[in-house]
Amino acid sequence: MHKSAGSSRIDCAEPPNDAPKVAYSTTLGKMVMGTAEAFLSSRLAKRYKGSVDLLITSPPFPLNRKKKYGNEQGEEYVKWLVSFGGPFKGMLAPGGSIVMEMGNAWEPGKPVMSTLALRALIAFLDEGGYFLCQQFICHNPARLPTPAQWVNIERIRLKDSFTHVWWMAATDRPKASNRRVLKEYSSSMRTLLETGKYNSGSRPSEHSIGKRSFLTDNGGAIPSNVLTFANTAATDEYQRFCREKDLLPHPARMPRGLVEFFVKLLTDPRDIVMDPFAGSNTTGAVAESLGRRWICVEPMAEYVEGSMGRFPSLQ
């Protein structure tokens, strides 16, 4: 079943749930075919226990309709997510982090939002004994108007265009540096640095701005916790590969920029990045491009094979 860098096809026979196997590998990482539950209790996972610096993932959302990639619903979703609280913690290195993207859900047949995802998050935090380091919003301005019934047809709600991203850790001071994710300064900030002129003194908020508070060039601006990624590419290498091989692309791919942001923020080169719900394996591809080691897990053979399209060395 296993193929290494340089191979173009893999044997995608579904492995038994209790026997996850490496489907392909690259210079820095491995893609495992199997369920997250089976992987976490496998011998393969033992090699990574206590050494994962970043576990970043977008687990199946608690949607009202069952998807091909599998998603629990109702209270079963809460129980399912909570079951990973302890096992995920066991994978983390000292100072390691968990970053989890969770979308919004709606009550079946009603124009009201469900609190299911939030309740699942709180139960997950409690189960693992995690600290919630920071909440982020991932905004997709190009997302289609949903839920269609309430937004497009009845016109009684606004389109849902963001997901929550939760940064958690087993310690209140996990490894992190915002110096690695600085944004380019705005033109007005550049002007301020060049001229040294700005309005110092007290603000209505009662903050007092000193005469030299903003005159240090730190190489860029500290970003906010609202991240914007359109995620609209229709002709990237992954989708071209899927079309050429007549494979179904994963319908819920994480934005590449989102993964890049957190890999840079929370890891160093050669650190280990893990995604237990890898889907199209955006996580592995980003980790590879940034010089991080990686281990990713996905149960569906078609998605595993399609994810090879993210690695030129495998084609």
Image (cartoon, grey):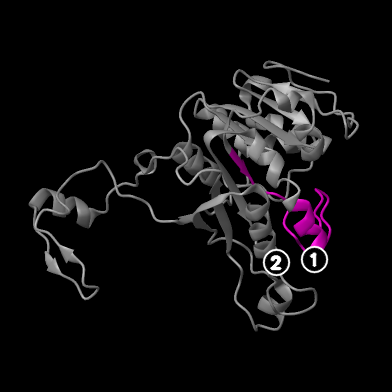
Answer whether residue 239 is visible to the viewer in this image.
no
Answer whether residue 284 is visible to the viewer in this image.
yes
Q: Is residue 284 highlighted in magenta?
A: no
Tell me the residue that label 2 is attached to.
105
Q: Position of residue 153 (x, y in %)?
A: 71, 80
Q: Residue at horizontal 80%, vertical 63%?
A: 75
- Residue 161: which quarter of the image? bottom right
Span of residues in magenta: 55-81
Give the class, few, some or many, for how many residues have Cα within 10 Å of label 2's Cα (few <14, many ≥20). Answer: some
Of the numbered discs 1 and 2, the one sitting upstream in the chain is 1
Task: Count numbered badges in the picture.
Answer: 2
Q: Quadrant of the C terminus?
A: top right
Local SS, label 2: loop
Q: Position of residue 186 (x, y in %)?
A: 27, 53
Give the class, few, some or many, for how many residues have Cα within 10 Å of label 1's Cα (few <14, many ≥20). Answer: some
Q: Which of 188 and 123 is in front in this view?
A: 123
Q: Residue 64 bears which disc, if any?
A: 1
- Residue 234, placed above or below residue 25: below
Instruction: Give the alpha-carbon distance from disc 1 to disc 2, as whole Å.
Output: 8 Å
Q: Is residue 56 left or right of residue 300?
A: left
